[in-house]
Image: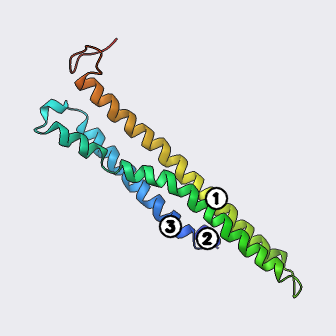
Amino acid sequence: MTLLARGGPVMIPLLLSSVVMAAIIIERFFVFSRTMKNPPAAVENPGRLFVDLQRGLPTLHTIITIAPMLGLLGTVTGLIRCFGLLGEGVRGYDPHIVSLGISEALLTTAAGLVIAVIATIFYNYFTHRLERYAQEWYGDGGGNTPGESRP
């Protein structure tokens, strides 16, 4: 049985979240590595450059927020299934069936947390690079001129 099937229906939005997350991360790596080689002043519209560099980051932040909640939702649905089966215990208690509900709960929790952790790492990485790029070329308000190196 695959993890997707064992995790129950909540694994579908978690899978979709992880695919979107991976696509954003890969695309941002290509954009950042290509764009940040040149100063923003070399671009016709530097304001648009920064808007383009931020594209996808709000979606990544949304994934950071919803992935653990989806994992928790899977936990709740898995435990509801377990307790529902235990409530039918008068007619026959099967520990294997109950363990499947607990497994569903744990799998979705773990998947949601893993997705959120990975997304957080890359979100912080990209936002930090973007902030450093802007400070490097436009100064940080400390009297430095754009492009001037700092000690």
* Type of amino acid under label 3: Pro
Q: Which residue is mark 1?
A: 109
Spot occupied by residue 139 in the image (x, y as percentages of width and height): 26, 21
Spot occupied by residue 122 in the image (x, y as percentages of width and height): 44, 43
Spot occupied by residue 137 in the image (x, y as percentages of width and height): 23, 25
Quarter of the image with the C terminus in it = top left
User: How dense is the environment of label 3, judged by Cα within 10 Å: few (below 14), some, or many (20 and up)?
Assistant: some
Q: CA distance from mark 2 to mark 3?
A: 16 Å
What label does residue 2 carry, if any?
Answer: 2
Q: Identify which residue is drawn at 51% across, 47% down.
A: 118
Which of discs 2 and 3 lies nearer the camera? The answer is 3
* Type of amino acid under label 2: Thr
Q: Name the element at disc 2.
A: loop
Lower position in the chain sequence, tag 2 or tag 3: 2
Out of 120 and 34, give the one closest to the viewer: 120
User: How dense is the environment of label 1, judged by Cα within 10 Å: few (below 14), some, or many (20 and up)?
Assistant: many
What label does residue 13 carry, if any?
Answer: 3
Q: Seen from this angle, which residue lies furthest top?
A: 151
Residue 151 drawn above or below residue 45: above
